[in-house]
Image: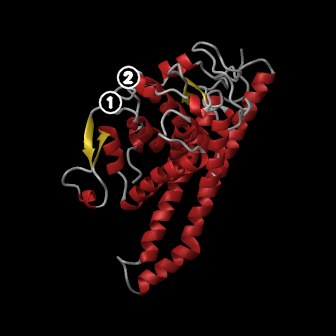
Amino acid sequence: MPFYGADVDQLKALSKALASGASLLTTRARELDSLITQGAHWQGQDAKRFASDWQGHLRPLLERTSRGIEEASKSVLTNADEQSSASTEGGGSSGSGSGGSGTGSGNSSQGDSAKPANDATTKTTDPTQPTPQEILEKYQVSDAETTNWPGDWDPLRFVTDQRVVTEKEAELLNGLGPFELNAFKGIHDDAFSVADERFPSEDRNDDQNDAFRHAYWNALMVKEFGADWAEDYATAHEQLPGNPAPREAMDLYNNEVGRNVAIANPDASAEELANLIEEAVNNGDTVVVGPDLLPHPSNQIPADQTGDAGNAEPAPGEDPEFNDESRTTS
């Protein structure tokens, strides 16, 4: 039987790659602009002429190129959505189908009010969303070896506190330059502060504050470092030993939601991403831990009725497949 149309999954993968490239180009332009405008390492007339050329021609060219790639990413994603809709309406398939993993992008219509939680095996009103038990089982990663970062003799010890991270986290962080590390810290701090503003919480665990924070953190990392780096780092972070199974599943799921939101909205500002993530939490596109210690859609469990994943046991998980080409942003 002949195949007509486009492969939806391949189109989405292309859109993701384009968005990642545009984000990386924007990051590089920002770093270069900071180095050139400071002028600490290059003085004289040649330096002034180059700085003028940078401001007047080269930087605008990079910005136009980045915007062009972002527009291409959005166009490809639009075509993927149209192909998926056409296949659905026609009762057929474009080859790879449009069913997702259950992660949304802030466009669900499930409603904002809290609803009774479904049991562990019952599907939600969205047929593409997995059950709580399916989420618990699928979104698990294996424990990894840990290390202290920065290392004992690393000069970064003078400017940042040493902490225990997975070896993959350390590898990714060591690939960042000074400006990128500063941006990384800002993203972490912003995720906490904005989550506290939009979803106040006493302990910040297992509830809507937690869901928003992880999704927004990942969306900001995609915007700053690209989707591949963000996925690698967020996944490696969840490999810290001893993470209770419901919390690990919740975090991995919500991390994916946040990345999908950023990939689908490459031109969005940080504020716009926060609005989209807040909408996703209210619509139940993210998950929280229910009283049954399973991850449920975040609009089905009121914030004061979420469970405590600390009462659950860790669970075995699969080893993640990291994208080795995205280990550094340099």
Residue 21 visible, this orientation = yes
* Amino acid marked by disc 1: Pro
Q: Which residue is mark 1?
A: 241
Q: Which mark is residue 314?
A: 2
Identity of the residue drawn at 38% across and 36% down: 236
- Does 39 sit above or below residue 93? below
Residues packed near mark 1 inside 10 Å, few (<14), some (14 to 19) or many (20 plus): some
Marks 1 and 2 close (CB-CB < 8 Å): yes
Picture quarter containing residue 316?
top left
Instruction: Please say which color scheme the image uses.
Output: secondary structure
250 relative to 265 in the view: left or right: left
Instruction: Indicate which disc, 1 or 2, sits on the residue closer to the N terminus.
Output: 1
* Amino acid marked by disc 2: Pro
6 relative to 253 in the view: left or right: right
Q: CA distance from mark 1 to mark 2?
A: 9 Å
Q: Quadrant of the C terminus?
A: bottom left
Identity of the residue drawn at 42% across and 54% down: 185
Depth order, front residue of 104/55: 104
Q: Quadrant of the N terminus?
A: top right
